[in-house]
Image: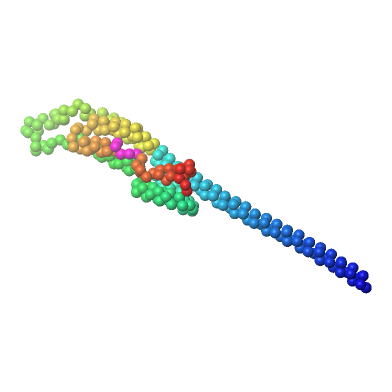
Amino acid sequence: SLAALRADQRANTRTLQDAASGNRLLRDEVLGLSQRNALLEENVARLTADSRQGLQLLRMEEVEVMLAQALLRLEYGHDLDSARRLYALADTMLQGLEGPGLLDLRQSLRSERRALDALGTDPRQQLATALQTQMGTLLAMQRQAPESQQNLQWWQRMLSPLVEIHRSDASVLLADSQRVQAIDSMQLEVSLARAALERGDKPGWDAALGRISDWVERLWPDGPVRQRQQQALTKLRNSPLTPVVPELGSTLRQMRQMRDGSATP
């Protein structure tokens, strides 16, 4: 019986030793799993930070592209409404980004948007309307009316049915056929001026208005009326075809400096 008890005790001791060894192995595996979980969490956090940073960089690139497109449409397409929409989209996208250096960009972008909104109507539309009004005024101008019969001398009243007196200005066209052709040529120049205005061609615009002014000198005699029309044409020539906004491009320049490393976002 003692031998059997000792054998059972030895068997129980081995069983306990095996259980303790198994517990140590399980504990080591649990510690290994905990370490692996910590490493996985660290890698996930790093990937999340990288993806967030990459997403922010991508959004910054999109904002830069929008601002560049807006400036191109203003410079070459003279499309003020499209530029305003692009600036609004860039502002909305910039609001969703985070970073200490983005506050200056937001303030600069809002300043540019206020400057664009202050322009009001597209300058090309204003110039086109002014040109149309000017053309209507020129076509409505009539040759100077003859003096009243009451102010004429007796010999002038007697000769008025036979002789028509005009200014001694050889450059002014008097024949009706010549005037009709000249007015048609002037209307053609107006069409050329409108085409140059649509293209944003400042030299073509100036040249067409200069030729219109030359036709005005040939169609109407010198006087206050003609001088006012020529001054109006000169004012149209001196008007810029594109809006002059000094603030435009400041946000884009700041973003490019940040991207090149000269400023830290």
Q: Is 86 placed left or right of 241 in the picture?
A: right
Compared with residue 203, is residue 55 higher up or lower down, i.e. above or below? below
Farthest bottom residue in view: 1
Q: Is residue 205 magenta?
A: no
Q: Is 174 placed left or right of 185 in the picture?
A: left
Q: Residue at x 13, y 36 (%)?
A: 147
Residue in the foreground of this view, choosing between 167 and 134: 134
Compared with residue 213, is residue 14 higher up or lower down, i.e. above or below? below
Farthest top residue in view: 170
From which residue to which does the magenta span run?
237-241
Q: Position of residue 207 (x, y in %)?
A: 32, 31
Q: Position of residue 79 (x, y in %)?
A: 40, 43
Q: Quadrant of residue 20?
A: bottom right
Give the position of the N terminus as an image quadrant. bottom right
Residue in the foreground of this view, choosing between 51 and 221: 51
Farthest left residue in view: 154
Q: Residue at x 9, y 31 (%)?
A: 156
Q: Residue at x 21, y 27 (%)?
A: 171
Residue in the foreground of this view, choosing between 215 and 72: 72
Q: Is 42 placed left or right of 224 in the picture?
A: right
Q: Position of residue 177 (x, y in %)?
A: 26, 29
Q: Does residue 210 appear in this view?
A: yes
